[in-house]
Image: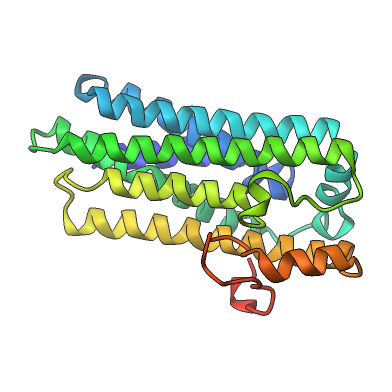
Amino acid sequence: MSYLWILLAVSLAVSAVGWKYFIYFFSLGYGFAIAALAVTMVIVFAGAITPPTALLCAVLLIFGCRLGGFLLIREKKAAAYRRILYDPSLQQKKPLGVIIMVWVFCALLYVGQVSPVAFRLGNTASGAVVTDLWAWIGAVVMALGVGLEAGADARKSAAKKLNPKRFVDTGLFKVVRCPNYLGELVIWTGALVSGIGAHLSAWQWVIVIAGYLGIVYVMFSGARRLEIRQDSVYGEDPDYQEYIKKTPILIPLLPLYSVKRHTWLRA
């Protein structure tokens, strides 16, 4: 499975942008690492690419480029976002060991997230009999997730232009308070589904599931941080209090309205 080492090397190289600014490990490094991994898989497995796996890689590439580009543009244009990004508490110098640990963890996580696609390609290249149906289903689910995330980001940007001081409760934000994170969960659920029927071994499933659970944890952790930040900004607003009482934080129809008390989600 030498291709895993290639993917890890690429993930480490791209996510190394976090050495410039720590939060980039989780933002720019994340988006562009996923895009780079998609391109790498196409190159490494050029002879094993099928229509559904080509679509899977294309969706990963689109997701990574869109997310990385969106975050880069937002950093350059949105003053409010820059204030959060360059908060003094985030600029405190981290111990070298912590930086290395986070860098390696992120790189491993990103490989784990794309591993269902990588294993499907690798097993196909080795002559295993795979079922394309689940690859098609996974790709469609992933594409829906990308659209959901992009729509949420666009809705928030538009709403903030109209009223920068008000929380966003329109569009997809009527369904859940973190629809962009919901989009991510849909994307990686689709990736997980694409591993079905790909002749994955037990150890391959361990990596796939670890990557999936890892990003689920990260999304809930991100929702917790956002909730705490929004409470500090809008906590005195009666409309906001009404909004958070009736709108689930992340999963539609799941009556989970707050995660800020769950300190185990701190990351």
x and y percent of residue 233 in the render?
88, 62
Which residue lies at the image location 48% right of the left edge and 41% below the top edge? 145
- The answer to which image quadrant residue 143 occupies is top left
x and y percent of residue 142 in the render?
42, 39
x and y percent of residue 235 in the render?
87, 69
x and y percent of residue 69 in the render?
66, 29
User: How many numbered marks have been drawn onto this rendered protein structure?
Assistant: 0
Coloring scheme used: rainbow
- Judged left or right of residue 124, residue 53 is right
Picture layout, residue 222 above or below residue 194: below
- Judged left or right of residue 44, residue 164 is right
Looking at the rendered image, the quarter that the N terminus falls into is top left
- The answer to which image quadrant residue 60 occupies is top left
- Judged left or right of residue 75, residue 149 is left
Q: Is residue 45 visible?
A: no
* Near-viewer residue (257 or 175): 175
Picture layout, residue 167 above or below residue 4: below
Which residue lies at the image location 28% right of the left edge and 43% below the top edge? 194
Q: Is residue 256 visible?
A: yes
Which residue lies at the image location 46% right of the left edge and 60% below the top edge? 214
Which residue lies at the image location 18% right of the left edge and 43% below the top edge? 198
Picture layout, residue 168 above or below residue 15: below
* Near-viewer residue (84 or 236): 236
* Near-viewer residue (63 or 44): 63
Looking at the rendered image, the quarter that the C terminus falls into is bottom right
